[in-house]
Amino acid sequence: DARGLQRRAVGPARVAVDLGATDTRGRSGVVWSLPHGGDLDVNLVHLRPNDSIGAHVNNDVDVAIAVFAGRGQVSINGTSHDLRSEVLVVVPKGARREIGAGADGITYLSIHRQRQPLGIGVRPKQSDDR
């Protein structure tokens, strides 16, 4: 692929990836994503030095953040945690989070269960609906 990643199929919807070969020299953002087809979403996110992802709430899934390289901070419901290699942080669904890169930037994996697609349909009738 264009990013120089080496992929080897090891079963249905599973791959082995050399994340160290991923080019992180560009802008901040997602630099690699696990191909869809299974129940898991995995994104390799790179933030350039001192960049951040603003505060937001994910009401759908718990998210694990595993630092691949660099340093930074994550704030979860107002409590700050250091991010560095070999650190794993779990952000519970419904928690407010914000992530900031340190002076050298940060690259981390964001791992969570696949979200259900948005759909349009009829709302189930509630017991108090008349």
Image (cartoon, rainbow, N blue to C red):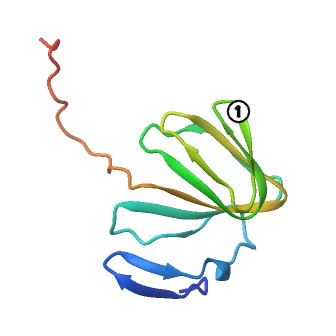
Which residue in the protein does label 1 denote?
79
Q: Is residue 102 above or below residue 69?
A: above
Question: In the image, what residue occupies the spot 32% across and 51% down?
Answer: 117
Residue 63 shows up from this direction: yes
Side of 13 where 32 appears, left or right: right
Q: Say few, some or many: other residues with alpha carbon within 10 Å of mark 1 (under 14 / 14 to 19 / 20 or more).
A: few
User: Residue 12, percent across and down?
Assistant: 31, 78
Spot occupied by residue 65 in the image (x, y as percentages of width and height): 60, 54
Query: 89 or 72: nearer the eye?
Result: 89
In the rendered view, tell whether residue 40 sits above or below residue 23: above
State which quadrant residue 31 falls in. bottom right
Q: In this rendered view, identify the residue nearer to me: 35 or 13.
A: 13
- Residue at 49 percent across and 33 percent down: it is 94
Can the viewer see residue 54 in this picture? no
| Picture layout, residue 61 above or below residue 28 | above
Q: Quadrant of residue 77?
A: top right
* Residue at image location 32% in from the left, 46% down from the top: 118
Counting from the top left corner in percent of width and height, residue 108 is at: 65, 61
**Quarter placement of the C terminus:** top left
The secondary element bearing badge 1 is classed as strand
Question: Residue 121: which quarter of the image?
Answer: top left
Indicate the amino acid at tag 1. Thr
**Horizontal and vertical percent for residue 3?**
61, 82
